[in-house]
């Protein structure tokens, strides 16, 4: 059985750029709340996924 990957430590400084996040790590909801960038992301089972933009009103 493989060792569980620990969550990254929370820092006092919030994450302001998506590029500062290592996608290979597992994150918690507490980590998610510390992210202040504008990119739309989802946290699924600890993994981060970029979301596609919402369709425009005309498209819907």
Image: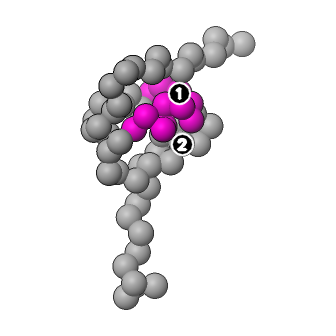
Q: Is residue 21 magenta?
A: no
Q: What residue sits 33% from the left and 25% below the top?
A: 13
Residues marked 1 and 2 touching at CB (< 8 Å): no
Residues 15 and 3: in front is: 15
Q: What residue sits 72% from the left and 13% below the top?
A: 1
Count of numbered circles on the image? 2
In x, y percent, where is residue 52?
Answer: 40, 60
Q: Earlier in the sequence, mark 1 or mark 2?
A: 1
Position of 56 relative to 17 (above/below): below
| Residue highlighted by disc 1 | 26
In x, y percent, where is residue 17?
Answer: 27, 38
Q: What residue sits 53% from the left and 27% below the top?
A: 26
In the image, farthest residue toward the bottom? 58
Residue 24 falls in which quadrant of the image?
top left
In the image, farthest residue toward the front? 12
Range drawn in magenta:
24-35
- Quick one: label 2, few (<14), some, or many (20+) residues within 10 Å? some
The image's mark for residue 58 is none
In x, y percent, where is residue 28?
Answer: 56, 30
What is the secondary structure assignment of the residue under circle 2? strand
Position of 20 relative to 4 (above/below): below
Q: What residue sits 33% from the left and 33% below the top?
A: 15
**Alpha carbon distance from label 1 to label 2:** 9 Å
Position of 60 relative to 55 (above/below): below
What is the secondary structure assignment of the residue under circle 1? loop
**Side (left or right) of 44 relative to 20:** right
Residue 21 falls in which quadrant of the image?
top left
**Side (left or right) of 1 relative to 43:** right
| Residue highlighted by disc 2 | 43
């Amino acid at each position: 059985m493989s060792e569980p990957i620990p969550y990254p430590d929370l820092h006092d400084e919030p994450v302001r750029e998506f590029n500062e996040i290592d996608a290979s790590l597992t994150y918690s909801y507490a980590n998610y709340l510390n992210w202040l960038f504008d990119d739309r992301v989802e946290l699924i089972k600890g993994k981060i996924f970029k979301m596609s933009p919402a369709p425009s009103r005309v498209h819907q």
